[in-house]
Amino acid sequence: MINIWRLTKIQLLSTFGLNKALHTQDTKERRKLLLLSLSILIGIFMVAAASFGYSYAMAQLFEQMGRMDLLLAIMMSAASVIGFFTTIYKASGVLFGYKDYDLVMSLPIRTSHVVASRVLLLYMLNLFFTLVLMLPAGAVYAIQVSPGASYYLFFLITLLFIPLLPIIAATLIGALISWISSRFRASRLISLILTMAVTIGIIMASFRMNGSEQVLADVSAQLGDMIFKLYPLAAIYVDAVCSSQVFSILLFISISLLVFILFSTVLGMKYKAIHTGLTTSHTNSKYVLKSLRTSSPFRALYFKELRRYYSSSLYVLNTGIGMILLLVTSIALLFMNPERLGQLIEVPQLTDYLGRMVPLAVSLFVILSCTASSSISLEGNHLWILKSSPISQKDILLSKVAVNLTITVPISMISCGMLIISLRTGWVESLLLMVIPVIYACYSAMLGVIANLKLPNLEWTTEVTVIKQSAAVLVSMLLGFISVVVPLAIMFMLSHVDGNLVLSGIGVILLALCYVMYRYIATRGERLFQAL
Amino acid sequence: MLTIRHFTKRYKGGKKAVDDLNLVVEKGDIYGFIGHNGAGKTTTIRSAVGVLDFEEGDIEIDGISIKKDPVACKRVTAYIPDNPDLYDHLTGIQYLNFIGDLYGVPRADRELLIKKYGDAFQITDSLGNLVSSYSHGMKQKLAIISALIHRPKLLVLDEPFVGLDPKAAHMLKTIMAELCSNGSAIFFSTHVLDVAEKLCNKIAIIKEGRLITHGKTEDVKGDHSLEDVFLELVDK
């Protein structure tokens, strides 16, 4: 057991540049990491405060119904759903895609313990989301109900077990996809397609479920039944925490732990075979030199970067899922009347709102698809190739921006084209709908490059550390999010002013910011890259 | 071809990795750079090829300062690190073509040299495979070929013989001699003192960041073997 913790600890130390922050002797670096930790803490505090407010508002409603247990049931289910969806597409990468595999597997440790340590890393990261959602909900429940001492004890104990089952369910799907993929020649491509198909499939299925039952919209006692039916563990959880049933808490913990142990043991048996299948390349020793196609250095860098992007299913899934969802939503809207959509969520003036807000909504998807924020860190040990080559650092950085634009611009243009048709926007709105997301795409890509230059992580052992957990990704995501939310708030506040005028103003400000960032990349960016 | 003047590299915290190093590699030289682990060889080499930034001193390649015009310096230089991590997601030929593009090597030249060195290192047949499928030695060979296809005036290598099979090591030595006879210069670090003694016309020995001796091989070693001289100097 101690070895599982040792392995998990080693992985945790590389997360968010934690170990670097603890051991660096460079005061400037330490200050930077301290500031980053502080801003992350502020971010967590803000999310927790919002979560508390949300729980409190729900509690008022449930109190009238006399069903306060629903508060914990809903928040526990929400934490589980978030855990499931944020794990499903990184599971394969965390389980099998790490560089120190040879080192770890040569140690005198059981394979099932190696698997357990990989799952525990996922668990640790998800526990964080669970705490942010559940602690405020638990506090609100305690304020409203004033339960006995056993509530606090049971609530805190079960808190640790909530993320376990959703993570294992997601990891199981991830491992199954890896296992199927490992049997094919193009294993990475198969893994990418399967993961994407499963993720989109589950999202679509959950939409359909909500639409058909129509119970989520009108809050009633049926809501509890539905949650308990869909996720029986929530019922056991509510019995354990709200009614302080010892049997239920034991059952809840036993199920979570048993599934964890069973999963680690079973996967441990097939672990090496799956890893070998995934990492073995099919080689051919009959290559004959053909005529080579030459290109300019920038083009060569661009295609190298694009190949790098498509070579990692985790990279594609993490940054591409937003664009795919945008495309799917745009196609779905083509077949749905916006007035009907308005009726569905009880906003009859939806068409009007959509016309104004949709460029920013599309831009939000664009911001979520930032490939540039991890592109420099992903160079890792290969950085020497670019640094010793006779090319300007600016070209290297701009090739990363260009790849990001390749991922975001064509899909957002196509989606906006469809949205123009489905929302029947006027010509000014249509123009803004086409232009604003493109400006955001440039803004997000350059912001990503700068964030990664400022917060690089070149010493990673698994891509997940860089793509999902690096400081650069978090910062650029947060700043990007703020850059969309602030204009949205301005739009709401200036609802009496012509929306197109406000949007145009926002576009001009963003363009100016893009120019400043471009200048920064071309001057200071070169020096920062050289110093890596 | 390579001039290092008063080069000092400090690491974060102020400790000197290399202290006031001066060295000149001329055209036609095969210059061996020797020192124990952590002596400052790799730091010097990485700074010379523009991979590592430095503040004190200057390094010139073909008369151009690496600080002032790094791109011009890199255009005539080739570098092979001690552990060549290459792009795993590219095939061998894609990698060589990528390097050819970055250095602007004409197509005919590129094809000719890839064929020549690919055959010499017996790797041509495998160039269609992903780099991730290559062994350490094959990656080393691919890195060497990528360094040679743009006909560098200065070849800088960090422990080039590690991981190479005897035949490939022999081939590399032949190519190094051939390059120098054509007017290029080679600067390389090694722990294999026999090779340095036989191959290099000049030797420099570094200890704890300071150059303790340098010059023509016969002057450095005198009547002794290079191994004896090295051990005596570093144990002082």
Image (spheres, rainbow, N blue to C red):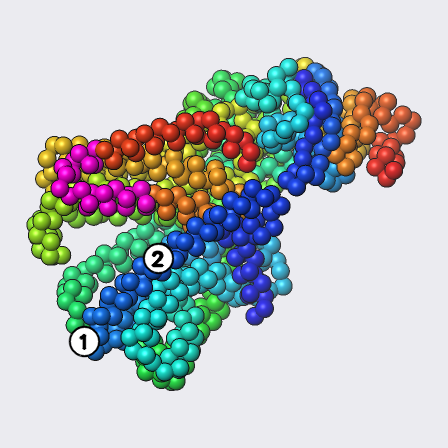
Indicate the quadrant containing the N terminus of chain A: top left, top right, bottom left or bottom right.
Answer: bottom right
Expressed as whole percent of the image width and height from the top left, the position of residue A41 reads 43, 55
In this view, A102 is above or below B89: below
Residue A358 visible to the viewer: no
The residue wearing badge 1 is A65
Please check whether the numbered discs 1 and 2 fall on a single chain: yes
In this view, A167 is above or below A18: below
Kindly indicate the quadrant of the structure image that contains residue A242.
bottom left
Tell me the residue at 82%/27% (across/down).
B213
Near mark 2 (Cα within 10 A), the count class, few <14, some 14-19 or many ≥20, is some
Expressed as whole percent of the image width and height from the top left, the position of residue A463 reads 47, 48
Expressed as whole percent of the image width and height from the top left, the position of residue A67 reads 23, 76
In this view, A67 is above or below A492: below
Magenta span: predominant SS is: helix
Indicate the quadrant containing the C terminus of chain A: top left, top right, bottom left or bottom right.
Answer: top right
Boundaries of the magenta span: A481-504
Tag 1, which secondary structure? helix
Residues under numbered marks 1 and 2 in contact, where contact means CB atoms less than 8 Å apart:
no
Question: The disc labelled 2 sits on which kind of residue?
Answer: Val
